[in-house]
Amino acid sequence: MIKAVVFDVDDTLYDQKAPFEAALAPILNLPQAFDLNLTFQTYRQQSAEAYARIANGRWSHQEMAVKRLNTALLAQHLPAVDTAAALDFQRAYTTGLRQIKLFPGLETALDQLSKQYQLGIITNGRTDAQLAKVMQLQMHRWMTREAIITSEDAGLAKPDPQIFTLMNRKLDLRASEVAYVGDNYSMDVKAAKQAGWHAFWFNHRNLEIPDHQWIPDQTVTDSFELQDLLLALTTACSEA
């Protein structure tokens, strides 16, 4: 029986692509209808590697900004940018992340979930940056700081299943009693399943499953489907 629901943050609780595209628009001057999905997904996939390289002193923050962005642009055959443009993008993107809002429907679902389940967060990234997003999203309304684990806090990063095991200890629950909600198949679904958790895939970018070894317990494709799934949990809990 599920007793806790734990969430990813980036592109799960809020739309991360919107501030990304807004920050890139003045730099690339692309047509309004141009879809930057591949660039965005490539940029996100580099998060763990970029964080590790900075932590190990192999990249400066400036080098990270340039290399990470240009690698993402190359994935969609877009022109590389210079250091000044990459830093302009980084500043605009950071500003955009200070204005994020929960996906539609999640506030209602969280209000109901918090009455019947323990709630938490597992997220990769620097603690200060991730907690700033959590505060902007007002997640403190539904969970305590103790129920939030960042990769910097843990010294572990998804997809390492041990970061999920750490949350088991914090919540004092068995793995089979916790469900994880995330948008990334490898980092969220596969990793949670490997840790023995239930996994709900918020696949709102309509991505393909790269392998079929680990199947999510539930898959939803928009935030209102996610709302319905989470509200169904509260109904099931009431009837149990």
Image (cartoon, helix red, strand yellow):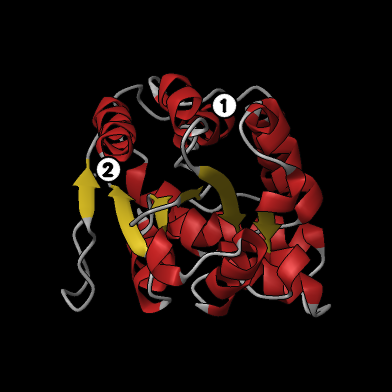
Image coords of residue 203 (percent x, y): 27, 46
Give the quadrant of residue 152: bottom right
Give the quadrant of residue 113: top left
Image coords of residue 30 (percent x, y): 41, 30
Q: What residue is drawn where x is 61% and y is 59%?
A: 171
The answer to which of 186 and 84 lies nearer the viewer is 186
The answer to which of 25 and 189 lies nearer the viewer is 189
Between circles 1 and 2, the one closer to the viewer is 2
Q: Is residue 118 left or right of residue 103?
A: right
Kind of residue at badge 2: Ala
**Which residue is farthest front?**
240
Kind of residue at badge 1: Pro
* Above or below: residue 97 compared with residue 130: above
Q: Quadrant of the N terminus?
A: bottom left
Image coords of residue 110 (percent x, y): 48, 29
Report the residue marked by disc 1: 26
Q: Is residue 16 left or right of residue 169?
A: left
Image coords of residue 12 (percent x, y): 44, 42
The answer to which of 46 and 127 lies nearer the viewer is 127
Give the label on residue 90, or none.
none
Give the label on residue 240, or none.
2
